Image (cartoon, rainbow, N blue to C red):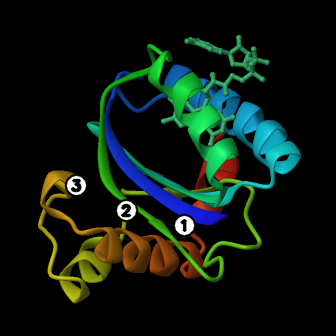
Amino acid sequence: MLSRLIYHSENHLGAVGGKMIADLNKIMDASNKNNERDGITGALIFDTLWFVQILEGDREKISATLRRLMADNRHDAVTIVDCREITERRFGNWWMGLAMLRGNTDEIYARHGIGPRLDPRKLTGEQVVAVALELAQGGLNRRLAEAA
Ligand code: FAD
């Protein structure tokens, strides 16, 4: 059953810098490896306070991923935003794409009625998907590689 899970959590990676980027790269490496194996696609949005993640795929695989995630001390307070069956993937090209919430994101937030600072506790699942798609389109996902 094709499903989509969206959650937010508190980021425990610390201040933006070399170690944070290295930690994030480790998370992305493990995510891409496992998600490709499990047929999970999606996006991970983050800033210094928050992670917001979209996971699309078989619901058993998503649940297994969620169980691993919940035991990971690099974040905390995992909170489900939305979970539903879907008919098609929106992030079919990304095992786990990364959209960084910094830099020139104000306009994107404003278009989605968010801001000035992201607070995922106030977002619906559809808003998360719309913002992630737009951040991805803008190429913000490439900044991590450039910054590393
Ligand atoms: P391993 O091969 O055991 O580890 C992968 C790498 O991560 C290793 O370098 C290991 O040292 C390091 N690592 C693992 N756990 C920790 C830790 N607690 N602290 C520091 N370093 C650690 N996993 C997915 O499979 N799919 C996802 O979409 C996904 N999204 C994530 C989103 C967030 C916000 C976070 C924090 C983690 C996410 N993870 C995801 C990672 C997940 O929590 C597990 O760490 C991972 O799934 C373990 O996979 P593995 O057993 O193959 O990793």
Q: Could you tell me residue 21's position as x and y percent?
A: 57, 32
At label 1, the amino acid type is: Leu
Q: Could you tell me residue 147's position as x and y percent?
A: 61, 45
Q: Nearer the viewer, mark 3 or mark 2?
A: 3
Give the distance between the C-alpha atoms of the residues marked 3 and 2, in whole angstroms.
Answer: 18 Å
Q: Residue 47: tell me if it is visible.
A: no
Residue at position x 69%, y 43% from top?
61
At label 2, the amino acid type is: Gly
Q: Quadrant of ligand 1?
A: top right
For disc 3, the neighbor class at 10 Å (few under 14, some 14 to 19, many from 20) is some
Q: Could you tell me residue 77's position as x and y percent?
A: 27, 27
Q: Nearer the viewer, residue 96 or 143?
A: 96
Query: Looking at the image, do the residues carrying marks 2 and 1 touch, with CB atoms under 8 Å apart?
Result: yes
User: What is the secondary structure assignment of the residue under circle 2?
Assistant: loop
Q: Nearer the viewer, residue 13 or 122?
A: 122
Which residue position is annotated with label 2? 103
Give above or below for 88 relative to 60.
below
Which residue position is annotated with label 1? 140
Query: Residue 75: which quarter of the image?
Result: top left
Work out whether mark 2 precedes mark 1 in sequence or the reverse, and give the earlier one: 2
Residue at position x 67%, y 52% from top?
146
Work out whether mark 3 precedes mark 1 in sequence or the reverse, and give the earlier one: 3
Q: Is residue 97 left or right of residue 72?
A: right
